[in-house]
């Protein structure tokens, strides 16, 4: 059985042979069963075992047949794959062989896998050693020692190989290799995705030669262009190469230096040409022949050099020498004779002009002195006029007010009222003219200081509310706590004129005065619902004596208010803007800068509210100090008409002496500021208070300058400005402070 089993599982047998063996085994078993007569049961059992064995053998045979079929199919597929692989290799080899460039492939281990025949064409001497399996480093060593490789001067095979291998680590490499017989190949080296390297070699000899030829033509064209340019410029030019030999020049050079053209030749030494400098062509200041030759012989980079040459007494040449990249240098020669002659002429002209300027300056200084004297005289005249004109005007107002006391006749009261209105109109016009005169005197007329808007707007409300109510117009003034930089007097004057005009020309509706915050400060606006101003009139209204809609009349003003506003805003640097539409009203706005300082010491003119109706102190004693006899007399009549006792004096010294003689202490002090050559009004009040105590006092003056206001404020004295308003005197007597 062992031999049968071994024979049965012999893999070398064919299926037919294995079947034949099984049938022989069955036959033998059957014969043995038939020949065994002594034990039929055992024979039958053996038969059953044989049948069972036959079935198992048949199944194993079928399994072997299937395995054999699979093996045969796998062998067939492997053979087909090998055939296709070999075909692909042949196709790839044929494909790279058809490539016009040299081609080589190194794997990720830098081992040569394949290459085409053109890869060794450029260097036939390494063809025998260029085989599959050599390393990239071995390949580079072969190339570096090829006799076909043209090394540059000073370059060795080892240096070339090291530089070539150092670039092998780059992802993409493209460079040119110079071969003998002036041949060139371009080498392109690229990495593959699996870490291998592809090398392409392209013959670029024709391209290099064409580029060289084209470059040569371009250089020739450039040389011709440079030559033509040199010949057409007005300067003389000479060029020396790195060996200090003459390489080029233009004809202008020989003409300027007086050198025959035959002596200028290519290759001439620089020393030969420069030797003429200093002898035939003298140098200008700060230059010598030895210094020039030392500059030429410098081993270090030469700085630009500039000097002058003189050719006889006729020409002056400006020379500029500069180094070129090849260590040569270029020299340019410019004829500056005309410029020097012009400079000399200009110098002489300047000397003449300076003399004329000095003469004209002296004339202008004389004219300026005369103008300053005239301006000072005008200022003195304005100051005198403001005092001399306001003095009789104040007296007239006081006389008219005194004449009205106790008058009951309506006709007489009407006449006195008209006289009072006429005086008020004269006062208004005179004040406007004096304001314009002061504004024309320049920046000195204004005094910039911090001005709190709250008190100023409150005073303007008290001042204009009665007149607005009398016309049935609503006057609204928006309160504001901001502090701005301005002249307090002129700012008040600006707002007075704008608000007064708005009330004057508005028949119905309202007038709104309010501030608005801006990026740079505060914008004060005065809006009304009046008739508006036509566009063609909006520039003309700022001229003196111009009014919209009629001729000037004392009853409605002389047209000076907006002229004062315009000039005051210009002097103060406050932008003034106007918006108006006929039938829809008008809006004037003034831009004011916000103050960065506190306004504790700033001055805001105080307006006394009208119509208070307080009772007068009829038993008071008033000391009146006034040097103008007519005004003093008028004020005495007015004060005595109010039931007070008056002690009058013409000067401070007289007042002090009179009080000392009488031994009386007055209740109220009213002192004029300008009292003659002695003490002024402020000093007089201070002296009186020192002897009589802190009595209520008013400084009476027509001087509205900031200096007087500041001095009075520091002394704690309030001011009553001329021309004097009788109502202000009444309010002061009623509530003296």
Image (tube, rainbow, N blue to C red):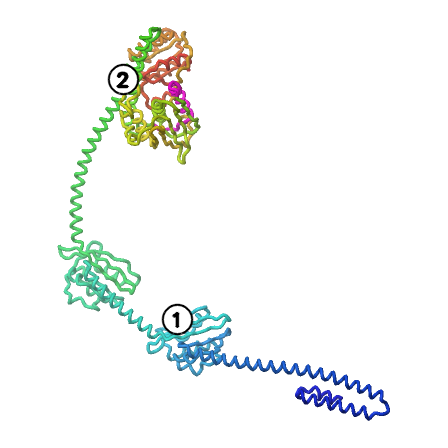
Q: Residue at x 42, y 10 (%)?
A: 615
Tell me which corner region of the image, top left, top right, bottom left or bottom right, holds residue 430: top left
In depth, the one of 712 and 139 nearer the eye is: 139
Label disc, if present, on residue 389 of the rendered structure: 2
Check residue 617 in the rendering and tell me which mark sits there, or answer none: none
Q: Residue at 42%, 69% (x, y): give it.
A: 173
Looking at the rendered image, the quarter that the N terminus falls into is: bottom right
Q: Is residue 703 left or right of residue 513?
A: left
Specify whether 595 is left or right of 316.
Answer: right
Q: Is residue 141 above or below residue 626?
A: below
Secondary-structure class at tag 1: strand
- Span highlighted in magenta in the image: 447-472
Q: Secondary structure at mark 2?
A: helix
Q: Is residue 630 above or below residue 111?
A: above
Residue 268 percent coordinates (x, y): 20, 68
Pointer 1: what residue?
Answer: 175
* Residue 572 as seen in the image, left or right of residue 82: left
Q: Is residue 297 above or below residue 75?
A: above
Q: Is residue 533 above or below residue 320?
A: above
């Amino acid at each position: 059985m062992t031999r049968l089993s071994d024979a049965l599982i012999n893999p070398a047998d064919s299926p037919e042979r294995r079947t034949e063996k099984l049938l022989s085994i069955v036959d033998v078993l059957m014969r043995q069963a038939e020949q065994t007569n002594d034990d039929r049961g055992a024979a039958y059992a053996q038969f059953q075992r044989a049948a069972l064995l036959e079935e198992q053998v048949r199944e194993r045979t079928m399994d072997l047949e299937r395995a054999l079929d699979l093996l045969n199919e796998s062998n067939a597929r492997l053979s087909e794959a090998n055939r296709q692989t070999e075909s692909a290799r042949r196709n790839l080899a044929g494909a790279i062989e058809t490539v016009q460039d040299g081609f080589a492939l190194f794997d990720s281990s830098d081992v040569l896998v394949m290459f085409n025949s053109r890869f060794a064409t450029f260097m036939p001497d390494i063809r025998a050693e260029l085989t599959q399996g050599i390393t990239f480093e071995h390949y580079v060593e072969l190339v570096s020692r090829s006799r076909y490789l043209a090394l540059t001067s000073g370059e060795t095979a080892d240096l070339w190989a090291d530089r070539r291998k150092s670039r092998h680590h780059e992802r993409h490499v493209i460079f040119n290799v110079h071969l003998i017989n002036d041949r060139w190949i371009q080498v392109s080296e690229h990495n593959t995705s699996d870490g291998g390297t592809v090398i392409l070699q392209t013959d670029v000899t024709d391209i290099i030669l064409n580029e060289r030829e084209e470059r040569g033509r371009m250089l020739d064209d450039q040389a011709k262009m440079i030559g033509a340019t040199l010949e057409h410029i007005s300067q003389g030019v000479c060029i020396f190469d790195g060996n200090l030999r003459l390489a080029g020049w233009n004809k202008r050079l020989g003409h300027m230096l007086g050198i025959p053209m035959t002596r200028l030749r290519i290759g001439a030494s620089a020393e030969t040409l420069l030797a003429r400098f200093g002898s035939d062509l003298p140098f200008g200041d700060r230059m010598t022949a030895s210094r020039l030759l030392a500059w030429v012989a410098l081993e270090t980079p030469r700085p630009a050099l500039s000097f002058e040459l003189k050719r006889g007494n006729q020409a002056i040449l400006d020379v500029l020498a500069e180094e070129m990249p090849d260590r040569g240098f270029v020299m340019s020669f410019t004829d500056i004779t005309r410029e020097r002659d012009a400079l000399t002429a200009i110098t002489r002209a300047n000397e003449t002009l300076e003399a004329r300027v000095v003469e004209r300056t002296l004339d202008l200084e004389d004219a300026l002195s005369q103008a300053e004297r005239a301006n000072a005289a005008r200022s003195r005249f304005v100051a005198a006029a403001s005092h001399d004109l306001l003095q009789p005007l104040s007296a007239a107002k006081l006389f008219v007010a005194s004449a009205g006391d106790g008058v009951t006749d309506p006709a007489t009261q009407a006449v006195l009222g008209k006289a009072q209105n006429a005086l008020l109109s004269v006062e208004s016009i005179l004040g406007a003219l004096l304001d314009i005169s002061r504004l024309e005197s320049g920046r000195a007329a204004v005094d910039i200081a911090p001005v709190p808007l709250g008190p100023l707007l409150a005073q303007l409300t008290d001042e204009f509310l009665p007149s607005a109510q009398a016309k049935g117009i609503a006057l609204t003034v928006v309160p504001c706590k901001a502090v701005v930089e301005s002249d307090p007097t002129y700012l008040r004057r600006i707002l007075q004129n704008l608000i007064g005009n708005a009330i004057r020309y508005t028949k119905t509706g309202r007038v709104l005065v309010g501030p608005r915050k801006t990026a740079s400060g505060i914008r004060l606006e005065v809006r009304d619902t009046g008739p508006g101003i036509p566009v063609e009139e909006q520039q003309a209204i700022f001229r003196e004596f111009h009014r919209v809609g009629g001729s000037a009349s004392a009853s409605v003003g002389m047209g000076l208010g907006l002229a004062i506003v315009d000039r005051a805003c210009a002097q103060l640097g406050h932008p003034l803007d106007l918006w108006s539409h006929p039938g829809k009203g008008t809006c004037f706005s003034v831009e004011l800068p916000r103050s960065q300082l506190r306004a504790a010491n700033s001055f805001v003119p105080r307006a006394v509210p009208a119509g208070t109706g307080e009772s007068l102190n009829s038993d008071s004693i008033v000391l009146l100090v006034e040097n103008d006899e007519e005004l003093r007399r008028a004020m005495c009549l007015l004060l005595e008409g109010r039931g007070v006792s008056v002690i009058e004096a013409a000067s401070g010294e007289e007042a002090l002496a009179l009080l000392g003689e009488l031994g009386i202490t007055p209740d109220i002090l009213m002192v004029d500021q300008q009292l003659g050559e002695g003490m002024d009004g402020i000093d007089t009040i201070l002296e009186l208070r020192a002897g009589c105590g802190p009595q209520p006092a008013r400084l009476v003056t027509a001087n509205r300058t900031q200096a007087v206001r500041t001095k009075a404020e520091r002394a704690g004295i309030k001011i009553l400005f001329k021309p004097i308003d009788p109502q202000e005197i009444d309010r002061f007597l009623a509530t003296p402070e």
